[in-house]
Amino acid sequence: MSIGEENKIEEFSQDEQKKEYVSITEAAEINKVTRQAIYVAIKLNKLKAKKESSRWTIHVNDLAEYRRQKYSRKKSTFNGELLFDNEKGYFSVKQVAEMLGVPVQKIYYATRIGRLPAQRKGSAWVCHIDDVRTYKEANVNGRAQGEEAS
């Protein structure tokens, strides 16, 4: 989640404190998901809601709890270990692209042609920070220096 998104959620959180209950539409806007995703969360008992006459209402505390428990790829595991354990130096392709300031597709291409070593864990590609540094020195920094010399 980017800093801008966190700030926007904080703004919604301040607005929520003024209101005790929100509608499904408001809950969807706050969580940046579709109304259907909110309906599904309610039906799967992942989000508490009450149906009053024909409208669903969600208590702001329940919505906050849902956001804390919501699925995050950063929490994904493979064989009991975190897939993207940043403390151990393992990052997703998206995280690597953000670190290097390049498009995600460029990182996928680099892994496919062998310039950036990566491991497949389940359906995810995982890159180690040492490999990312080596790739950066050889490809990202090297090309930038070569362009300056031209």
Image: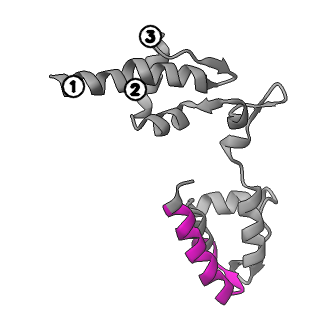
Q: Which residue is mark 2?
A: 106
Q: What span is in magenta?
A: 4-25
Q: CA gap, disc 3 to disc 2? A: 11 Å
Give the residue displayed 62% in from the left and 71% down from the top: 27
What type is the residue that disc 1 sits on? Glu
Instruction: Where is residue 105? Give x, y as percent.
Output: 42, 28
Q: Which quadrant holds residue 84?
A: top right
Residue 21 is inside the magenta segment: yes
* Horizontal side of residue 52 vs 150, given as left or right: right
Q: Quadrant of the C terminus?
A: top left
Going from the N terminus, do you reach mark 1 or mark 2 first?
2
Q: Which residue is mark 1?
A: 147
Q: CA gap, disc 1 to disc 2? A: 18 Å
Instruction: Where is residue 8? Give x, y as percent.
Output: 53, 69
Q: CA gap, disc 1 to disc 3? A: 23 Å
Instruction: Where is residue 125? Give x, y as percent.
Output: 60, 24
Report the front residue among 138 and 55: 138
Q: Which residue is mark 3?
A: 113
The secondary structure that dominates the magenta segment is helix
Cβ–Cβ under 8 Å for marks 1 and 3: no
Judging from the image, what secondary structure is the residue with disc 1 in? Answer: helix
Give the residue displayed 34% in from the left and 21% down from the top: 142
* Horizontal side of residue 66 vs 144, given as left or right: right
